[in-house]
């Protein structure tokens, strides 16, 4: 037996703990792709699902604040940006390339016809390469070069030497991915190992039947095989000794603690809450912080590139609807917007929209105080005109 094949023994409460582990069989070697790690895919997929679930608004600066514009261009980006896929699938592909497959880079080619935007074609990361120095670069797609101003190039986690190029999260996660793969391999091999008997029977080695596998099988059939569960065994006292054994568990190997620690590390590097990867418990505050600190910066990357490359007007810009992702229950939303309603800040149909209700006629006017009168009629109250009949 090699030095890696060891017998672990431990005595506790009068019981034996024993297991034989063949470490040669469970050592995990070779290259580990990040996309093959379930924890990494789960974390990145959560981010991609959230970003792709938000609507994209075309906004315009005005003297009284920013307003939403609804036209053919806003519909193109928010509803049908790519002719061969839905908007969610399109955005999901962009984010997955940005964070994982493209190592911090995601490229989209705009296709126009007579000056009108026809299609936004996302490019697989395997077909994209970059050449250039610290300031200028070109993008090569299927052996054809493009200037950066003619494509959409989304960048995540800029490279220290090439600020126009992203490097993603791949380097930080490589060691953790190897650890998680090794832990999964160890757990699978351990759970399927034959060296985990619940009972060990000591047999006199001089017994003739013990000399061959067939003989040992006959001994088991003769003395230990029963017709009913729970039926006692009757064995010769001078030939057999039965010991109860507690097999070595994953807890003894600290596999579960190692997996939990690595999952927390993955969550921290990717930027998702640990409960997304099955560690810890859900928290509204932690979820809302995740939306603000992680989802919003990624949304900013995308909306700023769209604004820079697809809009001519200096007053227009693209904006994701971040409010749709925050974890607020319907009672909280109802209380907040009801208070805004009675103070004349929002109208009734705006409140209904936040509660996913259709608008109704007559609720588009602003009202104030407990009288619920239109804001334009607040000066027509009798008490403000001196029409008090009691005086």
Image: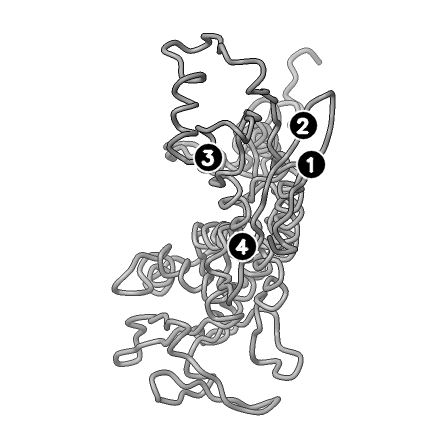
Mark 4 vs 1: CB contact within 8 A: no
Q: Residue at x 51, y 50 (%)?
A: 185
Please tell me in which quadrant of the rendered image residue 238 appears.
top right
> What is the distance, in whole Å, between disc 4 and disc 1 at their CAs?
27 Å
Mark closer to the observer (3, 2): 3
352 or 367: which is nearer to us? 352
Instruction: Compute the Cα span from label 2 to label 4.
Output: 31 Å
Q: Position of residue 214 (x, y in %)?
A: 37, 32
Which badge, 2 or 1, is on the more N-terminal residue?
1
Tell us which disc is closer to us: 2 or 4. 2
- In the rendered image of this protein, does residue 276 appear above or below residue 67? above
Disc 3: which residue: 211
Q: Earlier in the sequence, mark 3 or mark 1?
A: 1
Disc 3 versus disc 4: distance between alpha carbons? 42 Å
User: Which residue was labeled with disc 1?
Assistant: 9
Residue 16 got which mark?
A: 2
Q: Is residue 136 found left or right of 54 in the rendered image?
A: right
Occupied quadrant, residue 88: bottom left
Q: Looking at the rendered structure, which numbered label has been put on residue 181?
A: 4
State the quadrant of the C terminus. top right
Categorize mark 4 by other alpha carbons within 10 Å: few (<14), some (14-19), many (20+): some
> What label sits on residue 110 in the rendered view?
none
- Secondary element type, mark 1: strand
Q: Are marks 2 and 1 in contact (CB under 8 Å)?
A: yes
- Tags 3 and 4 touching, CB below 8 Å: no
Residues at marks 3 and 2, CA–CA distance in whole angstroms: 26 Å
Q: Position of residue 236 (x, y in %)?
A: 53, 13
**Nearer the observer, 356 or 362:** 356
- Frontmost residue, 119 versus 91: 91
Residue ID at (60%, 34%):
340
């Amino acid at each position: 037996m090699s030095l890696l094949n060891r017998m672990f023994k431990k005595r506790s409460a009068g019981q034996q703990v024993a297991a034989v582990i063949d470490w040669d069989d469970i050592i995990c070697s070779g290259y580990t792709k990040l996309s093959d790690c379930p924890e990494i895919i789960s974390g990145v997929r959560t981010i991609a699902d959230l970003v792709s679930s938000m609507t994209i608004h075309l906004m315009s600066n005005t003297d009284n604040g920013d307003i939403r514009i609804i036209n053919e261009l806003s519909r193109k980006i928010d509803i049908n940006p790519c002719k061969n896929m839905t908007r969610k699938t399109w955005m999901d592909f962009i984010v997955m390339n940005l964070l994982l497959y493209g190592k911090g880079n995601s490229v989209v080619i705009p296709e126009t016809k007579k000056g009108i935007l026809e299609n936004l074609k996302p490019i697989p990361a395997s077909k994209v390469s970059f050449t250039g120095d610290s300031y200028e670069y070109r993008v090569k797609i299927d052996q054809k070069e493009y200037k950066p101003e003619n494509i959409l190039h989304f960048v995540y986690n800029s490279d220290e030497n090439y600020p126009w190029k992203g490097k993603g999260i791949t380097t930080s996660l490589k060691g953790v991915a190897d650890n998680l793969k090794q832990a999964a391999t160890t757990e699978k091999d351990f759970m399927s190992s034959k060296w985990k008997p619940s009972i060990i029977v000591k047999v006199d080695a001089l017994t003739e039947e013990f000399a061959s596998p067939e003989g040992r099988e006959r001994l088991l059939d003769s003395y230990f095989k029963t017709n009913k569960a729970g039926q006692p065994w009757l064995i010769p006292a001078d030939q057999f000794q039965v010991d109860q054994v507690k097999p070595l568990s994953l807890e003894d190997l600290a596999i579960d603690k190692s997996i939990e620690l690595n999952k927390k590390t993955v969550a921290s590097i990717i930027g998702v809450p640990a409960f997304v990867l099955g560690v810890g418990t859900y928290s509204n505050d932690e979820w809302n912080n995740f939306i603000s600190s992680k989802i919003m910066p990624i949304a900013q990357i995308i909306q700023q590139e769209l604004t820079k490359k697809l809009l001519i007007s200096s007053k227009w810009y693209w904006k994701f609807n971040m409010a749709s992702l925050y974890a607020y229950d319907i009672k909280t939303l109802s209380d907040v917007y009801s208070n805004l309603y009675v103070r004349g800040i929002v109208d009734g149909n705006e409140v209904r929209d936040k509660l996913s209700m259709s608008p109704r006629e007559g609720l588009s006017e602003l009202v104030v105080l407990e009288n619920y009168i239109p804001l334009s009629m607040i000066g027509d109250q009798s008490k403000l005109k001196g029409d008090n009949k009691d005086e």
